[in-house]
Amino acid sequence: MSRLTRVAAGPYAPPVPARELTAVSADGARLHVEVHGPESAPAVVLAHGWTCSTAFWAAQISALSADHRVIAYDQRGHGRSPASPTSSTDALADDLEAVLAATLAPGERAVIAGHSMGGMTVMAASRRAGFREHAAAVLLCSTGSSDLVAASTVVPMRPGRIRTWLTRKILGSRAPLGPVTPLARRILKYGTMGPGSAPDMVEACARIVHACPRRVRHAWSQVLDLLDLDHGVRELNVPTAVVVGTADRLTPPVKARAVADALPDCLGLTELPGIGHMSPVEAPEPISRKIRELVDTYVRVDTQVKEDA
């Protein structure tokens, strides 16, 4: 592993998994999967976002793994999952189905949490049989379903064609990010995090994002630029909670509100004051608490019903 991929100590240092495995997607792509916590515990599946990795969920894994089976995987091309020639929302859906099949028993249900591109993964998979078999409830964090570049406020100017063009150039850049320097931290904090983000939060995110290969970063930026998953939101027929930070520049609250309005079974929209796009890192306790609430309501009850039957 590169020294840049994760912090080694503190609340954002990834815990050691109970076991690791490889899930194989429909096109043969190999996905690195980690399982944390007791094998008999209620299951939670975590899907990270663009340029991130399983390390992004360190705080949630630490908070939940004592009494949950927490499953986290690297999206194709990210973390320890090799790059693939295919970058598409259909591939994301294939990958999530492969992870669910590899880690959950037939008919076993879990809470599935997706951040940013991970949330889009859930939207893309909403009609899939494998997803519907295993999804008890969903948490969508800091995500959107369409028109992301036009809505982004990374470029501080009025909405319009010029801002959209500049945003597309920035997010789709092929330039290497280079080492994690003080300037790099400031840029990353401005673009992806709230103004009150603590230095350890910024450091953790910077190391993860800078470790993403630039070709992978560029390839997936093109997918996000053309994203249209509004239909996936409308067909996400499981109880779904939505969380967004009020200072999110990449997927602003307006995108979360649109998702919440379109969901068939929305459990509510939570807007976190002052939090940016990296909500699981910036607001670890509220995100972990929301996942726990969904498990207590939809997984534990479901398990008890099966036991009583």
Image (spheres, rainbow, N blue to C red):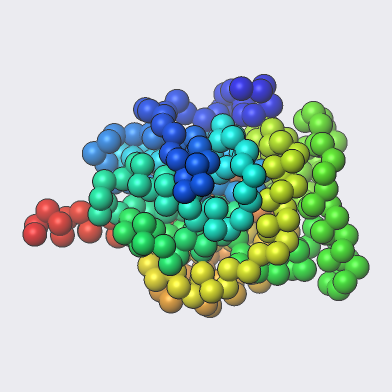
Residue 82 lies left or right of residue 33; in this view the side is right
Residue 215 found in image quarter = top right
Pick the front one: 253 or 80: 80
Quadrant in which the C terminus appears: bottom left
Residue 182 found in image quarter = top right
Instruction: Find residue 185 and report its horizontal and vertical position in percent.
Output: 78, 37
Task: Look at 58% across and 39% down and name the residue there.
Answer: 53
Pick the front one: 281 or 223: 223
Residue 56 in view (yes/no): no
Residue 164 found in image quarter = bottom right
Instruction: Find residue 221 and report its horizontal and vertical position in percent.
Output: 72, 53
Residue 135 lies left or right of residue 277; in this view the side is left
| Residue at the extreme front of the image, as rendered | 27
Task: Look at 72% across and 44% down and name the residue there.
Answer: 217
Compared with 302, 214 (above or below) is above
Count of number-bearing discs: 0
Task: Look at 68% across and 57% down and name the residue there.
Answer: 223
Instruction: Find residue 237 and report its horizontal and vertical position in percent.
Output: 39, 71
Task: Look at 75% across and 47% down and name the residue there.
Answer: 218
Quadrant in which the N terminus appears: top right
Residue 8 lies left or right of residue 291; in this view the side is right
Pick the front one: 181 or 52: 52
Residue 304 in view (yes/no): yes
| Residue at the extreme right of the image, as rendered | 162
